């Protein structure tokens, strides 16, 4: 992500320090992760200490400081999904991809995250891949669903 | 400014409006233990060691004395069975991280805290934030800050700033209640080239 | 749209909208809420639009993607007006038949209506379905009637009349009095009376004040705020504007989590439209009142649902709660008086203004007035959003509305209040839902999650689950929360893994007491609740784990084993083929055996066995397998 794009986003928010989180969200949304150079640029432009930016970038779940895989796998760990066996779904995905929540595999194929309630509790346990919801998952159907993504 | 009259451990105290219970207690020489408090810095309220028992209109509450503002007719007890229980537990929880901290060990003796109550998980940092806040509020250098949240929270130096500022300052070192900062700093210098986010104590 | 500059212009517009609307024109409302979309509502909407176009009916029939009406279990939900015929679990291939039969022929498609599983009686109308019949949907009933992106739709159901009423007929003090009289309590957690909060801000000497909508719905298993924001965003804006007028604020914020993109989109459109019409902005409806609203997206932190942490986040910082002992309605956002209420609280405000506090206080109990929306989820037949009058017994919500527990299983507990709440056992099922009643029972209302658990749910594991959630979601600033939760989680994990020891329960209680008393914010202070409430009502489950290394719910992996009963196994190969760990040995006509060392205890074999041969056991040794030479299945003679 180049400085011009970052500046554009900062300008959209009138360069206000209070918009810091909104600016970071927008960069995360476009770039899928926050490169260090981008954070340094924001620190300079908004005149916000870098320590504050690194706290925010690591505090909120939406931000990633490393590149993401091609497919974003979200396992819902909401209470409703939990009591219906979400842990088994998570373990199956961990086994198959070799990664833990918050990680991305070396081929940059999958990024795995756990999320708290996607609001489709009727379908629990739920797994979301690239925004598509897969419902009523069991270890077996989890395996089948994951296979479809290359 | 109006004077406020309150009682701390049975003694009447006249305090100024805006003072905290801790300040009022210090004024008459009553000691309340603290870890994250420093008179040069904004009250922080993180260690909760300075919790005291207050009674106001018959209602008993437990509050952090470093933050709670004095009120007329407030009755404060700096020690009670429950206050001591809180302090003992807090010390035990922290000793799992910094078992050899002199400050903690001294307090542990006073409150009968068992330094082996919880499994050791020596990270040395107790997250009092003195270094972070001193660097920001007093020195305004922002060389060290917090990263992450929950049980993964840590302190982290910004290598670029640390390389420039820290070697000539080091004023935060003596503030550290676990004397861990110096080690951290040496470590940071070694890894300056690496990502600022991973690192730490 | 020209800016509305007076009450008269608003009335004229409303008249016009109503006169343009033909009450007999068929309208097909399709739920486009998250649950129904996940069940395929997007394809259904597309199919309706294509079919209507194909048949040249576009001028005669209206279609609407609407907000969530609540019955997620049977989604996608379609309601056809003016008759209010309700079709459930509609698929794209059902669409031509619905158009042909119902829209053109005015006949019912019988196979798509609700059929009572017990009586087999059919219910054609929404109001006849048991799931809806026992509810009192003051807020949710509008969701299926309006297109959330259309301000005209909102005006047509009487929208913004409450704002007009306060601006032209009421003083700010009168508004506050009305809200106080209604005893509207905060729907987001602790149930603080809204009117008193507003009054404090109104009386604060500062001139700059703020109002905030807390839409950072973070409780896992709760999605009612999302449904309101997505389905009826103007009702929230209207409530917020009324609150702003009452306290004297000119700016408001909507703090909505970025995990809800549709809510962000719909509220953004609503603000734009409302500003265009003159319900927001300068000199609203010519009254002289100015009020603008900004959207701030939350970046993913449960703690930001705590009001002071939310304000810190709004200021552009990491969301740590403020440590100061001063209420935020006196000193809040940017140190200014700030009224923060939850989505559902704001949505109730226009109704109270329109119908009066006396009407509102007729609904509910002495301490809790009005209705409350719950997310009824977990081990329940009818998952969905339900809105009931305060005071309804939990039993009625679970059995009459929720249809009971699936699979003939036994009810064990209901969890309310999210991670700050607690689990209530069967003997408290007749407890009326209300703020104080739930707190007295050791739980709380919270934002309204209601998670039903059956006999297969382990209560120690539930406590561990919430503490695990909180270890990640605590801000980590204060010691009792960060370290207390860390140690409680460690003990709970040990217990569920069979490593529990005598004294663990007492230690848990001791840490819980200190964390509950000494933590800095509400998140920390309430963090021990899941542990304390399960200890209070299900202590024997903890003891079984610790003393007998037994999980009574047969749920904790490290304490259970699967084995195949040789007398029941038919050697059908089903479990053997499905086992992801390759832990089952056998062959056709060879009785199958689980190799315990290889078994990952995923439970797949247990689920696929049609002969009940796979057994789950805990706290007892696994029976030794048959010697290999005895495993050949001898076919029993025909009976």
Image (cartoon, rainbow, N blue to C red):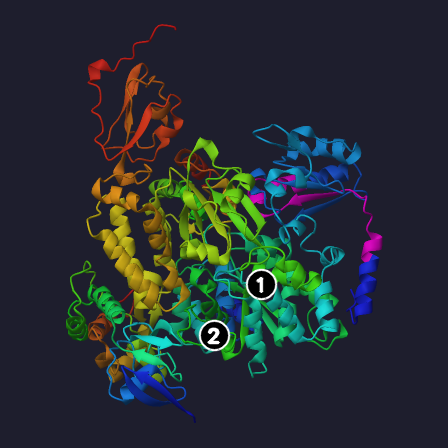
Observer-nearest residue: C432 or A59?
Answer: C432
Q: Secondary structure at mark 2?
A: loop
Q: Residue at x 69, y 41 (%)?
A: C79
Image location (x, y in percent) of residue B53: 31, 74
**Quadrant placement of the N terminus of chain C:** bottom right
Task: State left or right for residue C152 relative to residue A52.
Answer: right
Say if residue B23 shows up in the picture.
no
Residue at the disc numbered 1: C184
Residue at the disc numbered 2: C327
Image location (x, y in percent) of residue C613: 33, 23
**Quadrant placement of the C terminus of chain C:** top left
Query: How dense is the environment of label 2, judged by Cα within 10 Å: few (below 14), some, or many (20 and up)?
Result: some
Query: How dense is the environment of label 1, judged by Cα within 10 Å: few (below 14), some, or many (20 and up)?
Result: many
Observer-nearest residue: C367 or C553?
Answer: C367
Taking the magenta stretch, the answer to whether it contains residue B9 is no
- Res B83 quadrant in image: bottom left
Q: Secondary structure at mark 1?
A: loop
Image location (x, y in percent) of residue A135: 49, 39
Image location (x, y in percent) of residue B166: 27, 80
Say if residue C353 shows up in the picture.
yes
- Farthest residue in the bottom direction? B1
* Structural distance between the alpha carbons of marks 1 and 2: 19 Å
As displayed, is residue C619 above or below residue B153? above
Q: Residue at x 76, y 56 (%)?
A: C156
Marks 1 and 2, the one that precedes in the sequence: 1
Task: State left or right for residue C626 relative to residue C535.
Answer: left
Q: Which residues are magenta?
A: C17-46
Task: State left or right for residue C216 relative to residue B103.
Answer: right
**Figure disc tally:** 2
């Amino acid at each position: 992500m180049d400085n011009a794009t970052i500046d554009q986003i900062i300008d959209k928010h009138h360069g206000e320090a209070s918009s810091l989180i909104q600016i970071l969200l927008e960069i995360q949304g476009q770039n899928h992760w926050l490169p260090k150079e981008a954070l340094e640029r924001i620190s300079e432009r908004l005149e916000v200490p870098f320590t504050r930016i690194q706290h925010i970038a690591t505090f909120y779940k939406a931000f990633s400081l490393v590149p993401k895989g091609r497919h974003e796998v979200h396992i819902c760990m909401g209470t409703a999904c939990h009591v219906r066996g979400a842990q088994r779904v998570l373990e199956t995905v961990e086994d198959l991809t070799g990664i833990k929540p918050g990680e991305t595999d070396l081929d940059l194929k999958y990024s795995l995250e756990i999320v708290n309630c996607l609001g489709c509790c009727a379908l629990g346990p739920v797994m979301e891949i690239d925004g598509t919801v897969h419902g009523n998952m069991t270890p077996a159907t989890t395996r089948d669903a994951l296979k479809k993504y290359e | 400014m109006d004077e406020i009259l309150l009682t701390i451990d049975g003694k009447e105290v006249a305090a100024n409006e805006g003072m905290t219970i801790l300040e009022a207690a210090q004024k008459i020489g009553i000691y309340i233990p603290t870890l994250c408090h420093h008179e040069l810095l904004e009250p922080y309220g993180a260690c909760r060691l300075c919790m005291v028992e207050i009674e106001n209109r018959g209602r008993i509450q437990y509050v952090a004395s470093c933050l709670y503002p004095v009120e007329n007719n407030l009755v404060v007890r700096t020690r009670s069975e429950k206050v001591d229980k809180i302090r003992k537990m807090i010390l035990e929880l922290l000793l799992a991280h910094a078992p050899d901290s002199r400050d903690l060990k001294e307090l542990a003796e006073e409150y009968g805290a068992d330094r082996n109550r919880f499994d050791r998980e020596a990270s040395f940092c107790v997250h009092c934030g003195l270094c972070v806040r001193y660097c920001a509020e007093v020195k305004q250098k922002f060389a060290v800050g917090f990263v992450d949240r929950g049980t993964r929270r840590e302190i982290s130096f910004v290598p670029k700033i640390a390389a420039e500022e820290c070697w000539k300052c080091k004023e935060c070192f003596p503030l550290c209640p676990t004397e861990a900062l110096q080690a951290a700093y040496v470590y940071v210098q070694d890894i300056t080239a690496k990502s600022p986010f991973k690192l730490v104590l | 749209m020209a800016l509305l500059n007076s009450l008269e212009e608003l009335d004229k517009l409303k008249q016009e909208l109503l006169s343009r609307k033909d009450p007999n024109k068929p309208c097909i409302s399709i739920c486009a809420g998250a649950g129904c979309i996940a069940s395929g509502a997007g394809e259904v909407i597309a199919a309706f639009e294509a079919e209507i176009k194909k048949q040249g009916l576009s001028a005669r029939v209206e279609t609407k993607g609407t907000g969530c009406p609540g019955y997620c279990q049977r989604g996608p939900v379609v309601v056809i007006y003016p008759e209010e015929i309700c079709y459930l679990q509609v698929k794209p291939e059902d669409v031509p038949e619905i158009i042909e039969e119902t829209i053109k022929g005015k006949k019912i498609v019988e196979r798509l209506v609700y059929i009572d599983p017990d009586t087999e009686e059919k219910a054609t109308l929404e109001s006849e379905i048991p799931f809806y019949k026992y509810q009192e949907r003051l807020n949710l009933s509008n969701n299926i009637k309006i297109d959330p992106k259309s301000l005209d739709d909102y005006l047509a159901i009487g929208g913004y009349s409450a704002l007009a009423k306060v601006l032209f007929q009421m003083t700010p003090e009168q508004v506050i009095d009305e809200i106080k009289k209604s005893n509207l309590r905060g729907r987001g957690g602790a149930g603080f009376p809204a009117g008193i909060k507003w009054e404090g801000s109104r009386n604060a000497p500062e001139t700059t004040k703020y109002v905030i909508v807390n839409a950072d719905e973070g409780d896992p298993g709760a999605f009612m705020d999302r449904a309101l924001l997505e389905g009826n965003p103007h009702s929230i804006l209207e409530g917020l504007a009324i609150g702003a007028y009452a306290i004297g604020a000119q700016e408001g914020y909507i703090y909505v989590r970025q995990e809800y993109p549709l809510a962000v989109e719909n509220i953004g459109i609503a603000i734009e439209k409302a500003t265009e019409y003159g319900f927001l902005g300068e000199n609203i409806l010519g009254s002289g009142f100015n009020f603008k609203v900004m959207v701030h997206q939350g970046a993913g932190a449960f703690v930001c649902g705590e009001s002071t942490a939310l304000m810190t986040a709004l200021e552009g910082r990491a969301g740590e709660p403020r440590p100061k002992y001063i209420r935020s309605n006196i000193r809040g956002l940017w140190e200014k008086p700030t009224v923060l209420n939850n989505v559902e609280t704001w949505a109730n405000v226009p109704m109270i203004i329109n119908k009066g506090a006396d009407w509102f206080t007729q609904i509910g109990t002495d301490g809790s007035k009005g209705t409350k929306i719950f997310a009824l989820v977990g081990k329940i037949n009818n998952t969905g959003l339900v809105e009931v009058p305060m005071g309804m017994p939990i039993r009625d919500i679970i059995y009459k509305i929720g249809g009971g527990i699936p699979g003939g299983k036994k009810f064990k507990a209901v969890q309310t209040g999210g991670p700050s709440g607690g689990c209530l056992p069967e003997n408290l099922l007749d407890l009326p839902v209300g703020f104080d009643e739930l707190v007295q029972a050791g739980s709380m209302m919270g934002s309204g999650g209601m998670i039903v658990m059956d006999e297969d749910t382990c209560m120690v594991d539930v406590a561990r689950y919430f503490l695990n959630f909180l270890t990640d979601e605590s801000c980590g600033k204060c010691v009792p929360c960060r370290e207390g939760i860390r140690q409680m989680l460690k003990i709970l994990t040990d217990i569920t893994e069979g490593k529990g020891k005598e004294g663990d329960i007492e230690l848990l209680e001791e840490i819980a007491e200190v964390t509950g008393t000494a933590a800095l914010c509400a998140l920390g202070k309430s963090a021990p609740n899941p542990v304390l409430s399960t200890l209070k009502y299900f202590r024997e489950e903890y003891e079984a784990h610790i003393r007998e290394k037994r999980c009574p719910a047969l749920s904790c992996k490290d304490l259970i084993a699967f084995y195949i009963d040789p007398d029941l196994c038919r050697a059908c190969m089903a479990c053997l083929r499905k086992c992801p760990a390759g832990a089952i040995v056998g062959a056709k006509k060879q009785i199958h055996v689980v190799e315990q060392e290889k078994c990952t205890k995923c439970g797949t074999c247990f689920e696929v066995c049609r002969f009940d041969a796979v057994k789950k056991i805990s706290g007892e040794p696994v029976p030794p397998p048959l010697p290999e030479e005895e495993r050949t299945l001898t076919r029993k003679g025909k009976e």
